Image: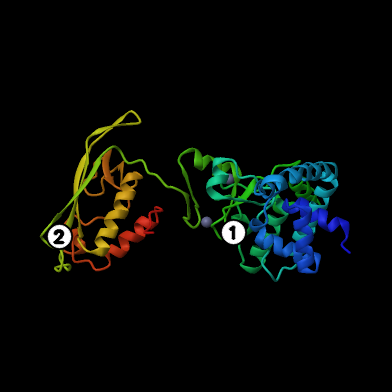
């Protein structure tokens, strides 16, 4: 016989139906195991909407009324159940904090909505104050991180004001307000990063200036990174003369052309560049990546020329090219056996990869 509250708790916390909650509880044996299973395989168990949406015909009608019933039930019980769910979160997080030998876990929240552009791109994980404090304490203790360095990498400010000088009681009070949504959760962890935290508003600011977010700590790119390259063209053709060191094949000759123009009200000088790749499998792969990078406006920018010192000129933007068939690395030419590998790394750093 199941404790009534356990089923309700799982229904609310994971947005699953009574039947699903029952099934998982029965198959897992204990409540804690059921929570673990749901925590790990959350996406497998659908929310009310999708679950009932998948049903067909008559079953759907029956289930619509079930759904209505469930939502009325949930609404009326909502407050108590939400408190239960939150108490559970709080208890888990307190437990995690005490177990200082194991790194505190930062788990995705069932209540996070990913509707803002920044949330959509980064699939961020909200981090209420208790989790963040526990994590920070752990880092300070075990990895000897200076608490002063535990700040938002963008604005260089505290995550939560004076977070580390608050008492545990104050932290728990704020945390409860955050997970019951009476206080906003302002800190997020980027989903693909290893515990890199930011203010929500700071990530949102980044997205305002483009369609991507680049982690300031590990350079992981979320979304598609686009540059500020001015208008120009990229054309390529094959020639017979080989690149030195690649005598077995011909050469791909790439021609970039940027006319002079105006950006942000200022004139800049255009440029014309020719670059070479061996016409073999790897060279053609690099050509494909360069084409993608060009389309994303990543290959050139307007700046000061390293070679001539001229300001407001169209210049290379961190992706090296070979402008000579010979002469070696010092002459920006071939042979240079690691060039193709290096240029692929440079492109990857801008989010351009081979599939
Ligand atoms: Zn910030
Ligand atoms: Zn990162």
Could one spot residue 90 in this view of the protein? Answer: no
Residue 178 image offset from top left, x and y in percent: 74, 46
Quarter assignment of residue 266: top left
Q: Identify the residue position indicated by label 1 in the image.
A: 195
At x 22%, y 66%, the residue is: 336
Alpha carbon of mark 1 to alpha carbon of mark 2: how far? 45 Å
Query: How many marks overall?
Result: 2
- Of 45 and 232, the residue lying toward us: 45
Quick one: SS at disc 1?
Answer: loop
Label ID, residue 309 = none
Is residue 327 toward the left or the right of residue 189 in the image?
Answer: left
Mark toward the start of the polypeptide (1 vs 2): 1
| Left or right: residue 298 compared with residue 243 | right
Q: How crowded is mark 1: few (under 14 residues within 10 Å), some or many (20 or more)?
A: few
Q: Which residue is drawn at 48% across and 55% down?
A: 220
Point out residue 301 in the picture as x, y percentages from the top left corner: 31, 43
Q: Which mark is on residue 325? A: 2
Which residue lies at the image location 60% right of the left edge and 46% below the top edge? Answer: 199
Q: In which quarter of the image is the N terminus?
A: bottom right
In terms of image quarters, where does ligand 1 lie?
Answer: top right
* Foreground of the two, 166 or 91: 91
Q: In this view, does 297 lie above or below 262?
A: below
Name the residue at the front extreme.
Answer: 58
Rendered position, 109 above or below 92: above
Q: Is 169 on the left-hand or right-hand side of 261?
A: right
Residue at the image position 39 percent from the left and 59 percent from the top:
355
Q: Is residue 155 left or right of residue 59?
A: left
* Quarter holding residue 329: bottom left
Residue 282 vertical placement versus 225 (above, below) = below
Q: In which quarter of the image is residue 262?
A: top left
Expressed as whole percent of the image width and height from the top left, the position of residue 14 reads: 72, 53
């Amino acid at each position: 016989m199941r404790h009534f509250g356990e089923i309700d708790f799982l229904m609310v916390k994971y947005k699953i139906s009574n039947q699903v909650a029952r099934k998982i509880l029965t198959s897992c044996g204990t409540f804690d195991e059921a929570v673990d299973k749901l925590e790990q395989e959350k996406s497998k168990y659908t929310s009310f909407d999708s679950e009932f949406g998948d049903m067909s015909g008559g079953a759907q009608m029956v289930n619509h009324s079930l759904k209505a019933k469930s939502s009325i039930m949930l609404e009326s019980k909502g407050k108590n159940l939400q408190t239960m769910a939150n108490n559970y979160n709080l208890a888990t997080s307190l437990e995690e904090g005490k177990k200082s030998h194991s790194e505190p876990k930062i788990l995705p929240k069932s209540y996070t909505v990913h509707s803002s552009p920044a949330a959509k791109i980064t699939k961020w994980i909200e981090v209420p104050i208790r989790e963040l404090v526990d994590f920070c304490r752990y880092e300070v203790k075990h990895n000897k991180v200076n608490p002063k360095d535990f700040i938002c990498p963008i604005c260089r400010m505290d995550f939560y004001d004076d977070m580390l000088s608050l008492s545990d009681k104050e932290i728990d009070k704020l945390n409860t307000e955050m997970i019951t949504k009476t206080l906003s959760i302002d800190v997020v962890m980027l989903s693909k990063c290893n515990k890199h935290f930011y203010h929500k508003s700071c990530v949102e600011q980044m997205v305002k200036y483009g369609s991507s977010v680049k982690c300031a700590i590990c350079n992981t790119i979320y979304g598609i990174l686009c540059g500020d390259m001015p208008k120009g063209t990229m054309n390529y053709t094959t020639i017979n003369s080989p690149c030195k060191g690649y005598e077995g094949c011909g050469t791909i000759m790439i021609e970039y052309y940027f006319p002079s123009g105006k950006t942000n009200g200022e004139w800049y000088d255009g440029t014309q560049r020719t670059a070479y790749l061996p016409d073999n499998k790897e060279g053609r792969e690099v050509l494909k990546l360069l084409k993608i990078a060009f389309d994303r406006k990543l290959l050139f920018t307007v700046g000061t020329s390293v070679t001539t010192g001229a300001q407001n000129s169209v210049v290379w933007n961190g992706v090296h090219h070979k402008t000579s068939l010979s002469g070696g690395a010092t002459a920006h030419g071939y042979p240079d056996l690691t060039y193709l590998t290096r240029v692929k790394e440079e492109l990857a750093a801008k989010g351009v990869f081979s599939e």
